[in-house]
Image (spheres, grey):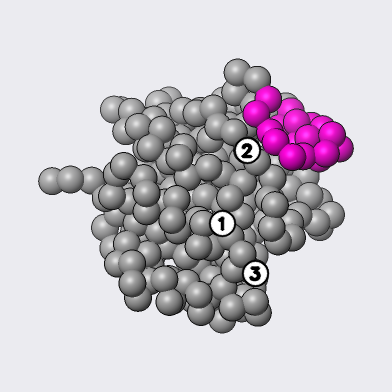
Amino acid sequence: MSTRAVVVSPTYNERENLETLVRKVLALPSSIDLLIVDDSSPDGTGQLADEIARREPRVKVLHRSVKDGLGRAYIAGFKWALARGYDFVLEMDADLSHDPADVPRLLEAASQADLALGSRYRDGIRVINWPLKRLMLSLGAAAYVRLITGMQFTDPTGGFKCFRRGTLEAIDLDSVQSNGYSFQIELTHRAWRRGFRVAEVPIIFTDRFHGTSKMSGRIVREALGMVWRLWFQHGLRRSPAPPKPA
């Protein structure tokens, strides 16, 4: 039986990027589906996604009536994918900062691990079009997460990932509390502390050229507090459980 994979991409006012995103995902060598999770974008992203889905059967659309955060959108998408029997579920930004051409590499890594993380900082810094202040904030956040939690990943805050089905099922999506920037940290920590195998894959990150970033001071503050809560949830331990059997 062949494996099935789907890319989950939440959208809010991403109309300018959507056609390019779809074209690049559908051009991948593997037959990978794309789920657009739209939070009632006022710019018509959801309507455009519906138009594309009518002519492209590999494009699916999940509409949400309110905009209540990136984490909630991803969880809705993950549940949709699990209910439809997908073996691998990827998360990828819709603003093209993540290159769809890297999807096969993440899938390959996830075939040998339980979670594959796309890393901007593995074997060097691979970030394009970021101001120095934003880069320093991201590098500092990664170091902060490593210090508090013990997770020794180069890019624990990154949002380009590939989960095996069993990993997502074990994470207990209904109990995930974070929603913004810290959502990425929490999901990786939940997998890591349960002893799942986590692999890092070097990627090139290119900041968006169209649209507006959703980053805010509130999202950063949420992440700073979340790290301490994860540490306490793990019993003040800074090492994972014994690895899961292959």
The range drawn in magenta is 125-145
Residue at the spot of label 1 = 94
Seen from the viewer's position, the closer of residues 48 and 235 is: 48
Q: Residue furthest top?
A: 123
Residue at the spot of label 3 = 13
Asked where in the image residue 129 lies, by quadrant, the reply is: top right
Amino acid type, residue under disc 3 in the picture: Asn
Relative to residue 144, is residue 229 depicted above or below? Answer: below
Mark before the other along the chain sequence, 2 or 1: 1
**Disc 3 from disc 2: Cα separation:** 20 Å
Asked where in the image residue 23 lies, by quadrant, the reply is: bottom left
Relative to residue 3, is residue 124 depicted above or below? Answer: above
Q: Quadrant of the C terminus?
A: top left
Mark before the other along the chain sequence, 3 or 2: 3
Residue at the spot of label 2 = 205
The crowd level at tag 2 (other Cα within 10 Å; few <14, some 14-19, many 20+) is many
Measured from the top left, where is residue 27 in percent x and y? Answer: 37, 49
**Disc 2 from disc 1: Cα separation:** 13 Å
**Disc 3 from disc 1: Cα separation:** 10 Å
Decide if residue 71 is in sight here: no
Mark 2 residue element? strand
Seen from the viewer's position, the closer of residues 126 and 84 is: 126
Decide if residue 136 is in sight here: yes
Do labels 2 and 1 touch, CB within 8 Å?
A: no
Measured from the top left, where is residue 202 in percent x and y? Answer: 54, 27
Do labels 3 and 2 touch, CB within 8 Å?
A: no
Do labels 3 and 1 touch, CB within 8 Å?
A: no
User: Which residue is painted at 58% across and 60% down in the image?
Assistant: 17
Amino acid type, residue under disc 1 in the picture: Ala
Asked where in the image residue 84 lies, by quadrant, the reply is: bottom left
The crowd level at tag 3 (other Cα within 10 Å; few <14, some 14-19, many 20+) is many
